[in-house]
Amino acid sequence: MTTPSTVIKAPGEQAPERSGATGRPGKREGRRSEGTTLNVFSHGFLVVWAIMIVLPLLWLALGAFKTDAQIGGSALSWPSNWHFDAFGRAWTKGIGGYFANTLIVLVFSVPLTMLFGSMAAYVLARYPFTGNRLIYYFFVSGAMFPVFLALVPLFFMVKRFDMLNTYQGLVLVYVAYSMPFTVFFMHSFFRTLPTAIHEAAVIDGASDTRIFFQVMLPMAKPGLISVGIFNVLGQWNQYILPAVLMQPQSSADPERYMLTQGLIQLQYQMGYETDLPVLFAGATIAMVPMLVVYLSFQRQIQAGLTSATLK
Amino acid sequence: MSHVAQGRGKYGFIAGFLFAPLALYLTFVIWPYVQTFGYSFTNWTGQSPTFDFVGTDNYAALLKDEVFRGALWHNLLLLVFVPLVTILLALFFAFMVNAGGRGGAGGVQGVGGSRFYKVVYFFPQVLSLAILSVLFGAIYRSDEGGLLNGFLTGLGLIDANHPVEWLNEPNLVLWCLLLVVVWHGVGFYLVLFSAAMQSVPKDVYEAALLDGAGRAQTFFKVTLPLLWDSVQTSAVYLGIAAMDMFVLVSTMTSGQFGGGPDHHSEVMSTVLMRNFLYFGKSGYACAMGVVMLALTMILSVITLRATRRERIEF
């Protein structure tokens, strides 16, 4: 930890500035001088941690513009050549393909996850029947177990279906492993929807299936968005499942690596070929879409996360 | 579909809606979990379709396996320190962000820019572990090109000719990995604790303030007891994460599926994968899976028991 020097400096430097700058309404000046000093002190910690988050990410992205020698030479050097060619090379080295593979899988796996998860959650949340609780706990308990426990038989199960290194195999596995969280989340969401609307729809003569698709699902949209984002993030970032299931089974097989897996592949490869800017560019390409998704949906993500975990 | 469901009544509809999700879940999640137990009593290699039942031989072999025992020890260390460090940091930051600001007419509020901190601290959470591996692989580089070494040489703390070999230093490697996990996790738990703190009615804090409680007192006497449920949940989540560690160890450290140098960063999941995919000892790997499950269960129960307190209603 290299933080203390920065923090100790902070009170003297920032105290006068702070009282003027933070124009909080109704602030009483100098009410607690001890509080202000402490505030600046702990505010220092907040700033340091924020720097510890942002700086490495920026540094990684900058690395894509450096030369290999520059990266190895000194960490704190500023890129001298500002060329985008490392991004191009990373793309052709496979990142483009891995990106496409991940997109193909997610285009199918996320909607399927949402559909199946909502269907199961809806029935379990709103239709009392024998075994309801049992099936619910069955679904939800999957979140407790380490995925490693299932890995060996899972590999042979997928192999038996002849779906190793196929998109459809990974799609089905992703959907299955996303069930616990999706069912858990949507279950609590469907429970909050008012029964009156359901009854009105029944009186209008709508079938159960129709009520689900035309009344309940549209009403559950906020919940669907939250859990959808989580599934996108979770499946996009998944590493272990593709690492086991998406290996070419023979030399004739095409490489269908996912982005995360491809990135690790690139890390090994660039270690030998000593072209680190390509690796940094690849990581940046993988990083930016997720940061964009996060920044556009951060309200829903943070709200969804807390409603899911604090139940 | 709809009139069919109607014809068969409610149960037809229920069965129709549950069939596909349940079938997928049973096939790819539950059944493999169950099979693991069965395979753990065999000498199955994974290559041949035949295998023998060997009773508890695999488990007996596990007890004697030095590498696995070392891995188990590392998992236990992580199991203590990952939740401890992450939760302490997240609690501190959450308190600052939500109730650290004082002196306003409202009495209790976050420090300035708290919204910004909540957004930024969460960044690592949306990055895949593969990106973390590339990023921290570069940060921990053993020459001056690594961010950490570059920084320390810049400050004159280490000699430029002898930079620290972070990930190849037997005594450092595990702690380097711990830092990555903490860096990754703090934002998530900050947001989690923030939400819990915000659900505490403001007048509880104001009452404490009127009674003349200082910041530390407010935290320990008011905030922490009210947050205990979330802290407990977090400890269990982080414990499960500390039992895994596969991606970081296998990609950042040396050796087949990681674990180097000389097994000093070995964790159970990397030993499992090596035995399964490299040594072709599937039955043995399954036994490790069962041990991991048992430990996860035991530790969840212990965490929930040891931290049990009277629930506070508000």
Image: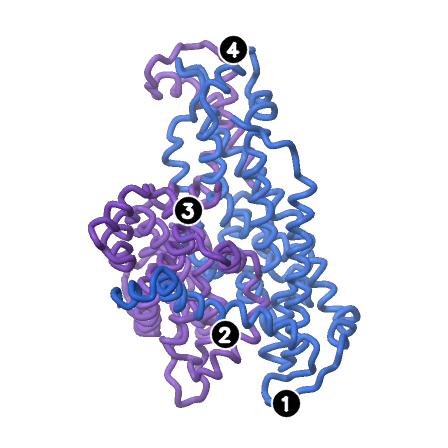
Chain colours: A purple, B blue
Amino acid under disc 3: Ser
What SS does tag 2 mark?
helix
Q: Chain of mark 2?
A: A
Viewer-side label of 2, 1: 1
- Which x, y percent locates residue B304? 64, 44
Q: Chain of mark 3?
A: A
Disc 3 target residue: A188
How far is the residue under mark 4 from the one under mark 1?
74 Å
Disc 3 with disc 1 on a shared chain: no
Callout 3: few (<14), some (14-19), or many (20+) C-alpha neighbours within 10 Å? Answer: some
Q: Chain of mark 4?
A: B
Q: For the residues labelled 2 and 3, say whether their Cβ atoms are less than 8 Å apart.
A: no
Disc 4 target residue: B210
- Which x, y percent locates residue A210? 24, 58
- Which x, y percent locates residue B95? 50, 30
How far is the residue under mark 2 from the one under mark 3?
33 Å
Amino acid under disc 4: Leu
Q: Quadrant of residue A146?
A: bottom right
Query: Can you see residue A72?
Result: no
